[in-house]
Amino acid sequence: MRLPVDTVESVSFPNFMLAHSGLNGAARRLLARATDLPEWVLDSPDTMVPSDHQLRLWEQLEHELDDPDVALRIGATNTLGHFGVHDYLFSTAPTLADGLARSEEFADLITTNVGFAVLGDSEDEANADIRLLNGLGRGRQLATQFALAAVVTRARNATGRDVRPIRLRFRQPAPRRHDGFVEMFGTRRVDFWAPTDQITFRAADLALPLRTADPALAAILRRAVPALPPPLRLEVSWSGQVHQALTVLLRDGRVTIDRAAHYMAMSRRSLQRRLADEGTTWTRELDRARAAVVEQRLHLGPGETQAALARRIGYSDAGALRRARQRWSARA
C-alpha cells in the first residue's frame, strides 16, 4: 500500500541510510532505484519525498545486507549536522529535555510522518511515544527502531554521557534474538508486542545540560525558521519530476537531453515519450526549468553577472537570456 503523498520526509533520511549502510556507490544507486527514488533527488537535499520511500528502503537494506539490526546500526551513527537546521535547534537547547522538546516542535522541518513527545509521568522517569502516522509492515518496524536509536545516540553525543533508557517497548513481534537492542540501548528491559512504541528516560538524564548549548544561536534559529522557504516536494507527475531534476542539473551548467536522460537512469527516447504522454516536450520543460532557476537567482550574488548566469543555464550571452525572459513574461 502506498502512503498519502502529503505524508513526507526529507530526502536527508534516505541519503543518511544509504551513506551509512556500508554499501558502495553502485549498490546504493540500485537500491534507490528499487524504491522508485529518482537518483537526482539525492542531490537535492531540501526536497521532501513521500514517506513510503524511506519505509521501502529500510526493507531493501535489510534484505540486501541480510542484517535484521540494520536500523539500529545506522541509528547509532547519528551525529550532529545530518538533518540541517532541525539538528541545530536540538543541539543549541540548554538541556536534553529542552532539546527533545524542540525536536518535536520543529519536526515538520524534516518529516510529517513521525511524532515524538516526552511526557513526565513521575519525578523519576518520563515516557516518550513515537508515532508513525502512516506505514505498515517491516518498513514501519525498522523506521521505528532507527528513530529511537538515533534519539538515544543524539542524547549521548550532546550530553557527553552514556544515556541509557530505563526500558523500551515495541509494537513489533519479538525477534529471534534481541542482542542488538540490548547493545544499542544499554538495557535488557526491551518488550515486544507492546501496545505502543515507547522509550522511557530517567528524569535525571533529561535534566543533563547539552555540551553544545548556545542561547544566542538558538534565538537566531527560532527567528529564522518561520522565514525559511517551503521545501520542494517530489512531484508525482513525470513532467514534475523532470522539472525538479533539471533545476538541480542547471546549477552545474548547460543541460542536454542526453545528460538529463542519463541522470534520470533512462533512455532519451523514453524521456521524450513520457513527456509527450503528459502533453509537453523536452524543449518546453527545459525552458520552464531555466525560468525557475533565473527566478531563484533574481538577485545575483557578489561578482555574478547576467552574462555568467546566461552561460550557466545554456544561453550564449546576456541578450539571449533577456529575450528568453521577455518570452516567459509574455507567456505568463
Image (tube, rainbow, N blue to C red):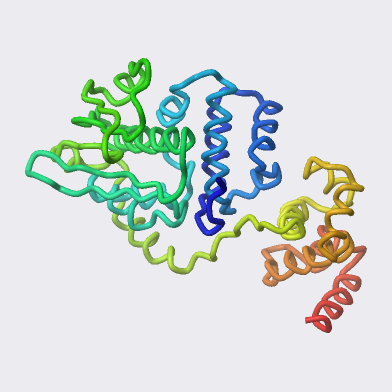
Residue at the extreme front of the image, as rendered:
1
Q: Is residue 150 left or right of residue 325?
A: left
Q: Quadrant of residue 112?
A: bottom left
Query: Which image quarter holds the C terminus?
Result: bottom right
Q: Up-down: is 181 above or below 218?
A: above
Query: Which image quarter holds the N terminus?
Result: top right
Question: In percent of the image, x 83 and y 48: which residue is there?
Answer: 260
- The front one of 308 and 261 is 261
Q: Position of residue 311 (x, y in %)?
A: 85, 60
Q: Where is residue 109 in the image (x, y as percent from the top left)?
A: 45, 56
Q: Where is residue 275 in the image (x, y as percent from the top left)?
A: 84, 58
Question: In percent of the image, x 66 and y 45: which residue is there?
Answer: 43
Q: In which quarter of the image is residue 56?
A: top right
- The front one of 118 and 311 is 118
Q: Up-down: is 240 above or below 25?
A: below
Q: In this view, does 130 lie to the left or right of 61?
A: left
Question: In percent of the image, x 23 and y 20: which residue is there?
Answer: 188
Q: Up-down: is 327 above or below 110?
A: below
Q: Where is residue 126 in the image (x, y as percent from the top left)?
A: 17, 42
